[in-house]
Amino acid sequence: MDELRGDQAAWVFDGESISIRYETKGWFKSPLLKLLGSVELPVSAVQSVDFLPGAGRKNGWVMNLRMRDRMDPYAAVGAMLDEKSEPFRLTGPAKTELVAEYLADQITFAASQAGPPDPATPTRLVPALPLHIRTCEGTARLEAGRLTLVWGGSYASSFKKKKQRREYDLAEITGVEWMPLDDWGWGFVRFITRENAEGTSAKPKNDLNLLRAGEEGNEIHQVLLLAAAVTAHRWALGGATRPALASGADGTEEAPPGFDDPEWWKEAARNTMEVMRGPRLTLNLPGLGSAKVGEDGPEEPAEAQRPPEAEPAPAPAPPAAPAGAAGADTAWIFEQIERLGDLHAKGLLTDEEFSAKKAELLDRI
């Protein structure tokens, strides 16, 4: 078991997880990390490790854990968070640089060998439920599946006091915004739903989707913890109900990913590359079924298609197509080049990959 003590915390790595215990003594320590206390981070949630020797104070080192997608709720809501309050960042003196670099290498290797993370992992990186916070404007309570805002504080506007409270099902929240203290000493957390996604003209003191925080009592960091906790539990809820890509599931809880979903394009890129490698000219796109070259006439209904297990073994590659089929092959090739161009524009194919596959397709004409 490897242990590393830095300026903000002590990290203990056992090969599968990183136990992080934040320092709480000293007025200069991060108020957010003091509130958080400690977390247990599975190494499967780590994408990579940035180790920067000599980049810290007095030539000390800096280590940052870069998390996988939808694994860091603090980065998702706290983009304006001070560096010293980032929970997965550690700094230390130059004399411990070799130990820190060794630990960075160990975490990097373990992360590369780990499988996909549990979608519920982010919920273990935030305070446990029920979470209750209080600000000068009111209170918020987050429990399983539900968030409640109550405006009863001394700084709550008469408009909010008249409305008294707002309750949300966690599933209806589509996003969370956190704003640090401004020049007037106010910050806030705001909860976005499909109904208010276009924004609101109400001032923060009259916005019924928002809880303000002041300078006293560490309020701004409490609402950040609330924002991160809501985000983590939203992610876990989505991971539990979302059907797998191209699984054919008939679940009605959430629609399959569409063209605006990055996962659709990732899956499309993987399937396109498989087509380029294999002898069969078949392109599978998420939610669109399969398209085979040279097939004419209307597509068979889904219920009339042959079950996967009943399909015969693939036949050997056919001989060269007759001259009359050249038009169909050429049309298919240009269609694939267009699809590759879309993937390249989305950033899912590098310039080299796009050029190589384009040249390979053109050679078939």
Image: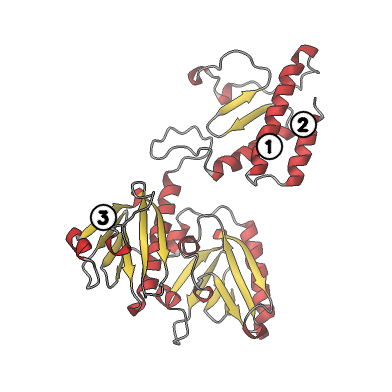
What kind of residue is marked 3?
Answer: Glu
Question: Which quadrant is the C terminus positioned in?
Answer: top right
When asked about the image quadrant of residue 92, the answer is bottom right
Q: Is residue 240 above or below residue 139?
A: above
Q: Is residue 224 above or below residue 316?
A: below
Query: Circles 2 and 1: CB distance less than 8 Å?
Result: yes
Observer-nearest residue: 172 or 216?
216
Q: On the image, numbered disc 1 is attached to which residue?
A: 340
**Residue 138, percent across and down?**
25, 68
Q: On the image, numbered disc 2 is attached to which residue?
A: 361
Q: Earlier in the sequence, mark 3 or mark 1?
A: 3
When asked about the image quadrant of residue 348, the answer is top right
Measured in 3D between alpha carbons, the distance from the residue under mark 3 to the one under mark 2, in whole angstroms, is: 56 Å
Q: Earlier in the sequence, mark 3 or mark 2?
A: 3
Residue positioned 43% across, 48% down in the render: 238
**Residue 58, percent across and down?**
65, 86
Q: Judge the density around disc 3: few (<14), some (14-19), many (≥20) Cα neighbours within 10 Å.
A: few
Secondary structure at numbered mark 3: strand
What kind of residue is marked 1?
Answer: Leu
Q: Judge the density around disc 2: few (<14), some (14-19), many (≥20) Cα neighbours within 10 Å.
A: some
Question: Which quadrant is the N terminus positioned in?
Answer: bottom right
Q: On the image, numbered disc 3 is attached to which residue?
A: 167
**Residue 287, percent across and down?**
52, 32
